Image (cartoon, rainbow, N blue to C red):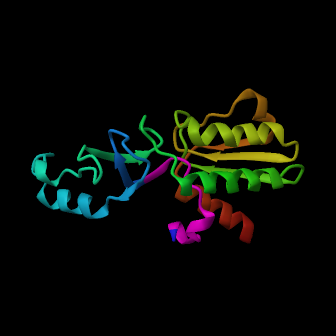
Amino acid sequence: MPAGFEADRVFEMEGKLTQMRCKNRCHDEVYPNQKAVLAMTEEEVNGRVPKELLPKCPKCGGDMEVNWGEMSSFTETKNWKEKAARYQEFIQNLHGKKLVILEFGIGWRNQMIKAPLMQLAAVEPQASYITFNKGEIYIPEEIKEKSIGVDGDLTVALKEIRKERID
């Protein structure tokens, strides 16, 4: 259960750091990497691990790499595509409704997550966009009037919001 949510209701649009795929892209499957990472961590010396611990593709024998959005070889698995479709359906069902978009700790360079949220705020007339990010608030001009940027420690900000809500 990711962060206490049912796994089938969570869309990790950038993939997962706990999954790896073939660097050669010989197939489109992803594999859990926790055992390999733990084994490498236990044998690491000065940032190096024994070569024999580096994961190899079960199909072609090539190197494996983390499967996430920052990598040029990010694989959109069947499961990822299904969740992406459910996410789009969820977004379409919000059309015309009051909406508060909360964004926690997403820097301006992470446009894979940030851009769709800002675009949603721009096209939905009843949407508000609230971003929390210490030292890095970015709100485009087109949604400034319906946005709030909270620059500071997220823990402190959430405690203040909770306090205001209770008072």
Q: Residue at point 36% right, 42% down? A: 26
The residue lying toward the viewer, choosing from 111 and 61, is 61
Q: Quadrant of residue 142?
A: top right
Q: Position of residue 27 (x, y in %)?
A: 40, 46
Q: Which residues are magenta?
A: 2-16
Q: Position of residue 54 (x, y in %)?
A: 19, 50
Residue reaching furthest to the top = 141
Q: Compared to 27, does 161 lie above or below?
A: below
- 95 relative to 5 in the view: left or right: right
Q: Compared to 108, does 7 lie above or below?
A: below
Quadrant of the snapshot with the C terminus: bottom right
The residue lying toward the viewer, choosing from 114 and 90, is 90
Marks counted in the figure total 0
Q: Residue at point 31% right, 62% down? A: 34
Q: Position of residue 15 (x, y in %)?
A: 48, 50
Q: Is residue 11 magenta?
A: yes
- 166 relative to 72 in the view: left or right: right
Q: Position of residue 6 (x, y in %)?
A: 59, 71
Q: Is residue 21 magenta?
A: no
Q: Residue at point 62% right, 40% down? A: 114
